[in-house]
Amino acid sequence: MASGALLRALECSACPEYVSPPITACEGGHSVCSGCRPRLHRCPACRRGLTAARNPALEELARTAVYPCREGCGEARGSPDDMARHHARCALRRLPCPLSCPWEGPRSGLRAHVLAAHPGNTLDLDDDPGAPFVAWDLPGAVSYRDSSQVVFCLGEVFLLDRRFDDARKKWLVALRLVGAACDAGGFRYKLKMSCAGGRRASFTDAPRPAREDLREVLESARCVAVDFDLLLHFVKGVRSIKIWRVGGSVTEL
């Protein structure tokens, strides 16, 4: 295992993960992981500017180091990517409530908390964590108002947010994964709408990591965006959501 000094040198200055190639640094020398770099303008440690310069020596050390679990569970050791995935799911990892209430606790207690405290904003579809996909209809009562929902499915935890953007005249549907950022690309989600007369419309996108700020995801339209003019055709229709694993066997809704 890598020494304590080396592990400290390989810590991202912006998040709880270790850095892995490509590794860039700020003007003060603090390292930033590739997951955090695109969303930062200044180093969170010293507030100095970020550079595009790579650190080949540190990258070589990162490739050969063996990392422990940062939560101290003692159950995993491996590469930065291995540990990022483990840390995202570690039962000891402390998480805030995804619905922004004061609760904070270990990941192992997240399901019990949201089911007890936010039953109206929680959907538990995790009867078969190994299933290739899940799908459900959006109730009419919540389809046309802003809402946030925690969805347990496919062995993962997702945040489903729906917002009306009056300025841009769009209905925005964003899905984020409460897990390792590198795992978000392993899933896709679809909004499908249908109405009498056989008219249909569907939109597909990839979920974003939960650590990405929801406001930024919505403002940059890194989500499903439906024009109000189109949405009006489906006011009395059916709206469905589907989430599936990339590469899995998926049938249509």
Image: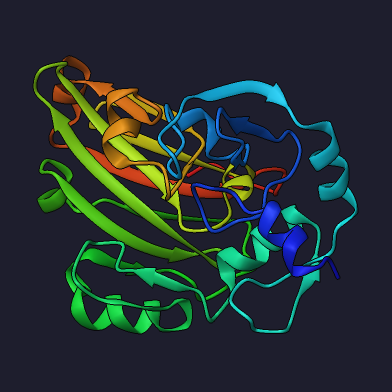
Closer-to-camera residue (216/33): 33
Horizontally, residue 52 falls left or right of residue 39, namely right
The image shows a total of numbered marks equal to 0
Residue 194 seen from this side: no
Horizontally, residue 109 falls left or right of residue 249, namely left
Closer-to-camera residue (136/62): 62
Q: Is residue 73 above or below residue 185?
A: below
Tell me the quarter of the picture where residue 70 sits.
bottom right
Residue 32 seen from this side: yes
The percent coordinates of residue 167 (x first, y second) are 10, 17
Q: Is residue 198 above or below residue 244?
A: above
Considering every residue shown, the one lying at the far front of the view is: 28
Colour approach in the figure: rainbow
The percent coordinates of residue 117 (x first, y second) are 19, 79
Q: Is residue 10 above or below residue 144?
A: below
Residue at image location 26% in from the left, 35% down from the top = 215
Tell me the quarter of the picture where residue 16 sits.
bottom right
Closer-to-camera residue (248/5): 5
Closer-to-camera residue (247/53): 53
Residue at image location 85% in from the left, 58% down from the top = 65
Horizontally, residue 83 falls left or right of residue 141, namely right
Residue at image location 65% in from the left, 84% down from the top = 73
Which image quadrant: the N terminus? Answer: bottom right
Residue at image location 48% in from the left, 64% down from the top = 153
Tell me the quarter of the picture where residue 115 sits.
bottom left
The percent coordinates of residue 242 (x first, y second) are 45, 47
Q: Is residue 85 above or below residue 24?
A: below
The percent coordinates of residue 52 (x first, y second) are 63, 20
